[in-house]
Image: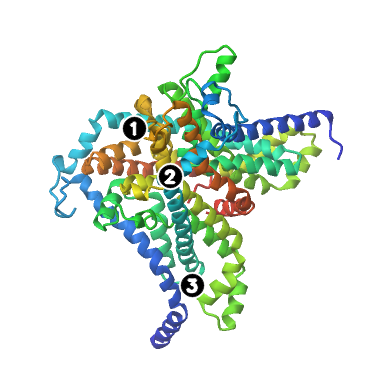
Amino acid sequence: MSNSKVSKTLSYFKRYWILYVMLLLPVAFFIIFRYIPMGYIQIAFKNYSIVKSPWEMEWADNHGFQYFIQAFSNRDFLYAIRNTLMLNFLDLLFGFPAPIILALILNELAFKRFKRFTQTVVYLPHFLSWIIISGMALQLFAPTNGLINIMLNRMGFPSIPFLNDPVYWVVMYVLLGIWQSVGWNTIIYLAAIAGINPELYEAASVDGAGRFRKIWHVTLPGLRPTIIVLLILSLGHILSSEFDRPYALSNKLVTEVSNVISIFVYNYGIRGLQFSLSTAVGLFQSVVCVIFLFAANALAKKTGERGIW
Amino acid sequence: MVKSRSTRIGDWVIVFICVIAILVCLLPVLNIAARSLSTAEALIRNEVFLWPKGFNFSAYETVLSDSKYTWSLAWTAILTVICTIWSLFMTILCAYPLIYDNLKGKKFIIALILFTMYFNAGTIPTYLLLKELHLLNNPLVLIIPNCISVFYVIILRSFLYGIPESLRESAELDGAGPLRILVNVYLPLSTPVLATLALFYAVGRWNGFTDALLYMSDRKYYPIQLLLYNILNSINSIEVATQEGFTTPGLSETIKSATVMFATVPILIVYPWLQRYFISGVTLGAVKG
């Protein structure tokens, strides 16, 4: 009995050993570059020393929580939390519905070739880096010789400091975010719309429903599961912060609103060499993100949705 | 089907909205292109909108004569090719074994991989590890530490999973091992999704600068985006502008536009060729992932 089991296992490995060899490099990648750094997280609770390994460093004061206390009494960090939450919330409020609306519009396009062309064009900004977008924005919205301000001036309005004034900068941050991602994000909604049973539309037509009633009673309910899943993910990331986008768009005049947590970590950690403090901040952010993600998922399940797991 | 009049009006309203969306996406690019091809004087006089004034290539010539910029373009191109091949190779190695349902330890490996999507060690721990591995300021740091994207592994695995198992079984009956089945059966069938992932990895590398900003202080290995950032954000330190005769503010503006165009054009060239592939690839990962 056990003999046959052993020989079965042997023949299994004889046949499939190559699969394990294939997995060797990827698994090594994940262990080295994703799991081993987790061991370094402990420096958030220790006094960093360049000559010692993380295991040998001394514990920080206040039961190891010294650097968390320091972070929360640091004005820059509190601003970074506020800015992260504010920018992500605005992204959620305006950036989240935008692709849904665009997908509904694209879906209503009666001319198939024109629809394909429109899709091709609106996906394009997704492939431009934030540095390039920032470079374009700096020129288009420049206070004196940018295209937009020239046009405003010709229409008799004064120039607007689009990227140099904190309030306008926040607006531009959100608008440029929509510009970059709205087309791309329609893909997932268009796929979900394509999966809706066409008979539902026919039935609605028979009942005399017009364009808007069909959107309201057929398309939107069909999109509901997709919307919920993406909403959970966005809510889960409300305290996570991109780096590229705020870093590329920011400038010295708007740091009070553009410094998000990832930029704080860069400034204090990589440039300021305060490794313990910036690791503590990063850990705080990661943990809160995971908690938010689970909470949002649990909430969705409670309301009878499928959730992401 | 006969459409009512209000439906037809609605159709044209929607076309109108879409035309506006197209213009909003394209006009900024056209404006930058026009600026880069105009004379500095025309820019200062605010005459350039969508068509260049005093059409000339001098800004491009200036940028191309700057060896730092051309080297950075070439280096980023090399880097992008290497990264794309290596990432694709690793992604295939990671995704293919995981479609074998009877693979022992499969669940554990999948959990190991998925966990990194939800929790990561953070910037500084990763930085310290790379420092310990002597990868800082080493060109390999721009290739290795981010070579696999879990999301793309999921996309590829879903696609491979969708290929009928009977194909695999009949190949196994013919005596083919897993490696031969991958090369002769699975890879030829998955060119669309592989093209999609290659595009994503390539664009990611071409557009990426965060890793270089964090881990690379040797200016020789700066990818184009980082150099571009430095050019755009420091009018005076721009190498080309400090050369004699190029210090007029207007000209440095056209040069800025030209540098932006150089970093954008490669993407504009590849994009139309590959875009027919990527939609199927993205939706696949989205529906199953």
Which residue occupies the foreground of this view, B262 or A45?
B262
Q: CA distance from mark 1 to mark 2?
A: 37 Å
Picture disc at residue B69: 2
* A279 vs B156: above or below: above
Q: Chain of mark 3?
A: B
Q: Is residue A91 left or right of residue A105?
A: left
Q: Position of residue B181 (x, y in %)?
A: 55, 75
Picture disc at residue B102: 3
The residue carrying pointer 1 sits among few (fewer than 14), some (14 to 19) or many (20 or more) residues within 10 Å by Cα, namely: many
Q: CA distance from mark 3 to mark 2?
A: 52 Å
Residue at 50% over, 43% down: B263
- Same chain for mark 3 and mark 2? The answer is yes
What amino acid is at disc 2?
Tyr
Which residue occupies the foreground of this view, A97 or A40?
A40
Which residue bears the numbered disc 1? A81
Q: Position of residue A249 (x, y in %)?
A: 43, 33
Picture disc at residue B199: none
Residue at 53% over, 60% down: B156
Which quarter of the rendering shows the N terminus of chain B?
Answer: top right
